[in-house]
Image (cartoon, helix red, strand yellow):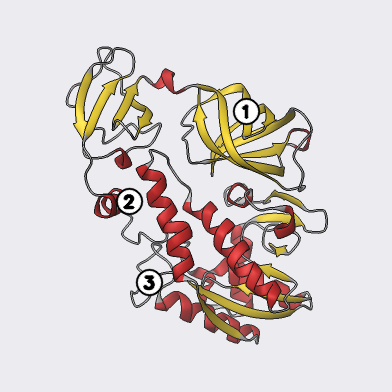
Amino acid sequence: MRVLAAMSGGVDSAVAAARAVAAGHDVVGVHLALSRTRDAIRSGSRGCCSKEDSADAARAADVLGIPFYVWDLSAEFARDVVDDFLDAYAAGETPNPCLRCNEKIKFEAVLDRALALGFDAVCTGHYARLDASVPRLRRSVDPGKDQSYVLAVLRADQLRHAMFPVGDTPKPEIRAEAERLGLRVASKPDSHDICFIPTGDTQGFLHERLGSTPGDLVDDATGEVLGSHDGVHGFTVGQRKGLGIDRPADDGRPRYVLGIEPVSGTVRVGSEAALDVHSITARTPVWTSGEAPAGPLRCVVQVRAHGGIAPASVVPGPSGVTVDLAEPLRGVAPGQAVAFYRADDDGDEVLGSATISAAA
């Protein structure tokens, strides 16, 4: 099988490519140049797409003895990931750029190009397990590294041409394997935070790009104006710190962001208990089987990349889905994904996902 290995310059994608080679596939490595400031030097575990990352990927490909290329997808990344990120925050939502990158870049732009060039599959270093012929996407055996949530946006036809070779192995063993293979990235730090904000200052990035649009901080229970802010993009549902309120609640307990209204600029705050969500409305559902269920689906849902899990019933509708939670969840933010996992499989198999529109 002809396999295009997406090599980020990290240890996971390098070992994934090595495993594809060891399995006898005809492998070509490609590094995705996604940043428009690639001359910057990577600092520790922040950022991506730097000169260092590209060089690390090229050295790994050389060790593996496979051809290597760099594809410039910076324009697509800026449009489909960065601009989407900014638009979502301006609309009072909390986006997940990693999820959007998998959907729009790695398994749309890259996969489409790979198939056009005669490749059979795209191989990445994501921590998930996959039986592509079904397709059946499952959690990684390493729960701390599991990335099935950010892959739950992939369609059945995309999963049939995907490979995730490292999902059956804990991360420490991946590093040990890289060391045995002579890959210099064996001890390279994992990347953290949002890759296109290498400083880690998300709020600073948002204020620089979106500017200042003042609004009120309002007590959800009483309607009292408690303070002001410079823009709804500075907040996310469930946020406790950095609210800018100069006096505590009457009971002395912390306040949390409960809701964001971008048109009026109102940010509603209240008690932790008021964060409880019993029902979720979500748009643009995607099903790994390729078909929506005919009726209510009993499953396990996840609303954050690491956490926010509960049993639920998902009811398909003409414009999306309604998720009725058997147990309340907190910190359910519009713009994030709600991923659906099979209930009778220990919540292991991904059934699909949708983008959260509202919660109650």
Query: What's the amino acid at mark 2?
Result: Thr
| Mark 2, secondary structure of its residue | helix
Give me the C-alpha separation between circle 3 and circle 2.
18 Å
Q: Is residue 360 above or below residue 55?
A: above
- Residue beneath the point at 63% across and 76% down: 180
Residue 284 coordinates in the image, percent (x, y): 60, 42
Give me the C-alpha separation between circle 3 and circle 1.
39 Å
Q: Earlier in the sequence, mark 3 or mark 1?
A: 3
Side of 337 where 81 appears, left or right: left
Q: Is residue 279 above or below residue 46?
A: above
Which numbered marker is on residue 36? Answer: 3
Residue 28 can be seen in this image: yes
Side of 174 where 273 appears, left or right: left
Residue 12 coordinates in the image, percent (x, y): 58, 66
Query: What's the amino acid at mark 3?
Result: Arg
Front of the two marks 2 and 1: 1
Mark 1: few/some/many CA within 10 Å (<14, 14-19, 20+)? many
Q: Which one is nearer the viewer's eye here, 182 or 207? A: 207
Examine the image and state in which quarter residue 259 appears. top left
- According to the image, label 2 marks what residue? 202
Of the 4 image quadrants, the one containing the N terminus is: bottom right
- Residue beneath the point at 58% across and 52% down: 145
- According to the image, label 1 marks what residue? 323
